[in-house]
Image (cartoon, helix red, strand yellow):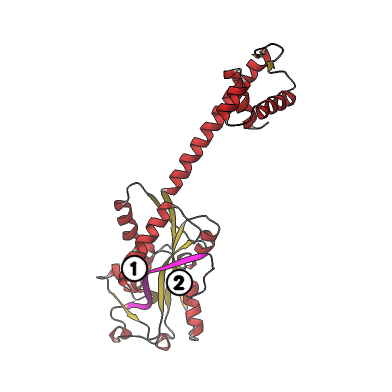
Amino acid sequence: MNLQKLQVFLTLYETLNYTETAERLYISQGNVSKQIMALEKELGVQLFDRSRRHIRITKEGKVVEAHARRILDSYQQMTVELSQLQEEKENEFLLHGIPSMPFYAIISEIAGFKKRHTNFEVSVEEEVDVLLDNLLKHKCDIIFARQFNDKLPKEVEMLTIDQDRWVVVLPSQHPLARKESINLKELEGEKFLQLSEKTQLLQPLLELCHAYQFDLKITYKGNRINLIIDFIENDLGLSLMMEKMIRSFEGKQIIWRPLDIETESLMVLMKLKTNKSEAVQQFWQEMQENYAKKD
C-alpha cells in the first residue's frame, strides 16, 4: 500500500465523483479508477458501491476511511517534525576540541559568535579521541586541533586561527633560566614532568625528541597542568609544554624559555567540505574573514 492510493481514496470519499477527484489531484480520471481498484484488490474488500448512477461508500469503505485519514495525518505530522529537526540542525553545530582549547582564542571566538547570532546553537565538547577521525565519521561538525604536519584528507577543509610553540618550563632559580633559548642537549639528565597521552601532546613531543635524538626521561605523567606547575615550582623537575598553555601561570615561581629549534604548532579548525549547515557556513565564513585580516 502506498500513500497515493490512500489520498485518492480519501478524495473520492469526499467528492463521490471521479471527475472532481481527478481535477483536485491533477491526475486523469482513469488513474483515479486504477488506484481505487488497486486498493480494493490489496485490501480484499469493495470500498465503493458503483452499481448505481452515483457511487456510494460501503461499510468497509467507512472503516478504511477512518484508518486512512489517521495514516495520512500521522505521515504529515512526521514530515513536519522531521522538517523541524532539519531546521534545528541547520541552526546548530557541534565542535570537538583538544583538552587544552581553553588556553586558545577559539573559546572567545565561539562566545562572540553566539552573542552575534542568538538564533544559532553552538555546542563544544572536549574530546580525547582522534579528532580527525570523529570529523570524518560525522560525530561532530568542526574540530579544533593542533596541526603538526601538512597531511590532510582531500574532503577536509582547514583554517589556521592560532599558533603555538614548545617551551621548556623550569623553576625560576634553575641555571638555564638565564638563557634566552635552550638547546635540547642542555636538558640531558633532567627529569621531566609531562602531560599524558590524553592531552594529545605527548606523542608529538616524543616524535620531536626522537627527531633530534634526545632521550626524554619522564618521571611523571598526568592530566592536571596546575599540578605539574606546582611540582616544577618545588624543583621536582622540568616540563616541555606549549607556550600559550602556561601563560596563565605567570606569577608562579617558574619561567619558560623557547627551544632553539623550530617547533611551531598550528592551531586549526577543520570541517568537511560537504557540510552545508547554515550555522557551520556562517561560523566558518566569519573565521575566514577574521583570520585573513590577521595574516
Marks 1 and 2, how far apart at CA: 16 Å
* Magenta stretch bounds: 152-170
Q: Earlier in the sequence, mark 1 or mark 2?
A: 2
Residue 176 is situated, as x and y percent measured from the top left of the image, at 32, 85
Q: Residue at x 46, y 76 (%)?
A: 205
Residue 65 is situated, as x and y percent measured from the top left of the image, at 61, 20
Please indicate, yes or no, whether residue 264 appears anywhere in the rendered image.
yes
- Tell me the quarter of the picture where residue 113 sits: bottom left
Residue 178 is situated, as x and y percent measured from the top left of the image, at 28, 86
Q: Which residue is mark 1?
A: 291
Q: Residue at x 72, y 12 (%)?
A: 51
Q: Which residue is mark 2?
A: 147
Q: Is residue 100 left or right of 6 when viewed as pictured?
A: left
Instruction: Please name the amino acid that badge 1 sits on.
Output: Tyr
Instruction: Please name the amino acid that badge 2 sits on.
Output: Gln
Answer few, some or many: residues within 10 Å of disc 1's Cα (few below 14, many 20 plus, some between 14 and 19).
few
Residue 121 is situated, as x and y percent measured from the top left of the image, at 38, 48
Point out the residue furthest to the top here. Answer: 52
